[in-house]
Image: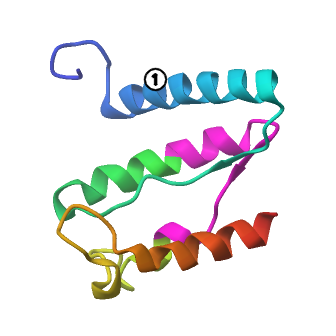
Amino acid sequence: AVEKGRYASVEEGMLHTINIFIKAALALRKKRGFRIFIHPVIPVLDETRKIVKAYNKIFEARVKEMPGMEWIDGVFPRLLTSDGAKLKKEYELDGTHLHPSYISLLGEGLTEIW
């Protein structure tokens, strides 16, 4: 979309998609009275990890501006090696999906904000 001139930058495109998500989530919150917990995009693929990190940074900032929406902290960095370059071996599954063992991290993150 950046190459086609739809957005001036990748970050602008990211913000656009995030705002679509937030608009839909806020509509659900209003209609159903949900308390919304947002899970960051998971950095499974080596090829997309850099862009996922940038996306999550913008995503987290927008979510934290929204009343009734909670960002689940602490999950994302714990999935990666200490240098943030690779997915930890214990969370690898098939090269595309996370191993189900990551759910314990998600549970811990929810416990912290519940």
Figure quadrant of the C terminus: bottom right
**Which residue bears the numbered disc 1?**
16
**Which residue appears at 46% of the width and 75% of the height?**
102
Closer-to-camera residue (39/33)? 33
Closer-to-camera residue (4/35)? 35
Residue 102 painted magenta: no
**Which residue appears at 54% of the width and 70% of the height?**
75
Residue 75 painted magenta: yes
Left or right: residue 42 versus residue 111 is left
In the image, the segment drawn in magenta is 58-76
Q: Position of residue 97 (x, y in %)?
A: 28, 63
Quadrant hosting residue 91: bottom left
Q: Position of residue 45 (x, y in %)?
A: 22, 61
Q: Position of residue 84 (x, y in %)?
A: 35, 75
Left or right: residue 69 versus residue 55 is right
Quadrant hosting residue 27: top right
**Which residue appears at 32% of the width and 27% of the height?**
9
Q: Residues within 10 Å of mark 1 (few under 14, many from 20)?
A: few
> Dot 1: what SS?
helix
Q: Position of residue 30 (x, y in %)?
A: 80, 23
* Kind of residue at disc 1: His
Left or right: residue 8 versus residue 35 is left
**Which residue appears at 43% of the width and 52% of the height?**
41
Q: How many marks?
A: 1
Color scheme of the displayed model? rainbow
Quadrant hosting residue 86: bottom left
In the rendered view, would you say 21 is above or below 49? above
Figure quadrant of the N terminus: top left
